[in-house]
Image (cartoon, helix red, strand yellow):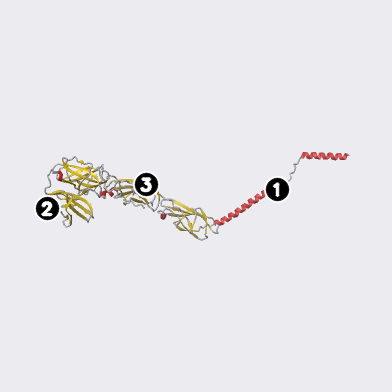
Amino acid sequence: MRVIWVPLIALLLLSNPSYSLKDSQESYHSPELDLIQIEGGNVQIFESSSDLRFDVGYIDSENVEIRWMIKDEGVTRYDGQSEFQSETNEWDSIPIHHHVISPCRCVLIIDVMVEEERIHREFGIIRAGEIALPNSSEKWVIVPKNPVSSIDQQIVDITYIQDGASSDFDVRWGIQSSKASESGCLDGLHNPPSVEQWIVVENNFNSTEFSIVQDLSSFGDGWWTILVQMGLDGNWSTWIGCTDIRLDITSPSVELSAPSKVPESSVPVVIDASSSSDTFWGREGLRYIWTLTEINSSNVARTSVGGDDGLFNLSAEDSGIFVVNLTIVDQVGHTNSTSVTIDIVNQRPNSALRIDGVPTDDGETIRLSDKDGWSIDAYYSTDTSNDVASLDYVWYLDGVPILSGIERTLERPEDDSVQHTLMLVVTDDNGEIDSSSVMFGVIDTPSDPEAQGSSMVILTGILVSIIFILFAAYLMMFMRQDRVPVVRPWDFESKKELESEATSSRTESESK
């Protein structure tokens, strides 16, 4: 009955990069950061109109769009889409219209769309014409190279690009709470910010592309906006680069609800983890990984990915002690686990014997019709729904097994002079048994229970009569003894005295 298969949790997690597990102290790096490569780099200077070429990495979809726009301080100068040219295996380049945007330190935004959903954004900076003096920070531009939409680590390493500073410059960053639908960060530019505390990065920078490590350990899960400025000698740029992030550094909670003991049944045991949740983000996007292990069994553990309802159905068709472990993985790969132990208890069957369709009681004595055989069955025997179809039935006559099966014909015993015992033994798939038996005799034969009952009545009557006669005789003798007169005891000496007195009297009479 048990089907065993063993995928590993790690394999299930790693099959989806969104659920990969990471060390909490490692800095964040998205596997999609290199999806777009801009020829010549993300910061370029154009002296005249030209084309900007780029490459796109492999995307497992046929419905891919590349959309781009060029913005100058929040104003879109122009935008468009790039088509994929199958004959050259390239995407259409982006036209840079120098006469349209100059003078400009513009931001180039490239979006990769799959089935109308943005999966990646790449920033670039396009400079056309003279903008400002090299050491004037007022017009410096800084934006994240690849804005990260979701962060699951306390320490994050974000790459930024800048144009304006040609020598050493300073960078500071801050963070403020936001809402996904009401963010002040628009296409990498934020104005005005409401940062409570700016953190100045200790290092000095001198390139157009650089990374800074940002510690987010003091911030809780939620929507945040990271802001960054560059400057020199305390003079900070009016341009404030930004990126909206979904911060998720807390593991989800796991709550399991399940009975500790249940009887065998064809109805599965429902294990409920629907109350599990991520602290801030709720249940949306949680992945449920269930592992089932049977104690004291050679069966290998079974692992499966459950549905998003958080419910797991444990088959109750076989008894045993089972440990159900649940590992919950949130959208960024944080995990939490717990387990419950469930004892599925086998129920002993209940035997029920019928003869010629008539139910009998265990230990009953019955009379069977005078014929060559009788139909016997165990259709009224019961067990849990999962076991009833697999019950074994063995029939015994006077302690000797004679038949097996739920319905058979009992042949008439050769000896009609005595009563016989028919017993049914029912066994389930766990070896649990129950039995039911009856004594029977055949009508109008010496084994007929009713005839034997009449003989006993006659014998009992005779015995009662004898006892009554004996009692009556005893009573009459006792009453007769009370009527006998009292006889004076015989006294030999008195007799001699009387005879002597009589002789004396006669002598006196004669002498006279």
Where in the figure is residue 234, as x and y percent of width and height?
A: 17, 40
Disc on the earlier residue, 1 or 2: 2
- Residue at (19%, 54%) from the top-left corner? 66
Q: Nearer the viewer, mark 1 or mark 3?
A: 3
- Label 3 secondary element: strand
Going by the numbered disc 2, the residue's amino acid type is His
- Residue at (67%, 50%) from the top-left corner? 473
Q: Is residue 92 above or below residue 23?
A: below
Could you tell me how far apart the alpha carbons at marks 1 and 2 are, in whole angstroms? 159 Å
Q: Quadrant of residue 485?
A: top right
Q: Nearer the viewer, mark 1 or mark 2?
A: 2
345 and 3: which is toward the camera: 345
Going by the numbered disc 3, the residue's amino acid type is Thr
* Mark drawn on residue 480: 1
* Mark drawn on residue 99: 2
Extreme residue in the bottom direction? 371
Could you tell me how far apart the alpha carbons at marks 2 and 3 are, in whole angstroms? 73 Å
Residue 58 seen from this side: no
289 and 240: which is toward the camera: 240
Going by the numbered disc 1, the residue's amino acid type is Arg
Query: Which residue carries the number 3 mark?
Result: 341
277 and 334: which is toward the camera: 277
Q: Is residue 331 above or below residue 497?
A: below
Disc on the earlier residue, 1 or 3: 3
Q: Quadrant of residue 138?
A: top left
Residue 231 seen from this side: yes
Extreme residue in the left direction? 47
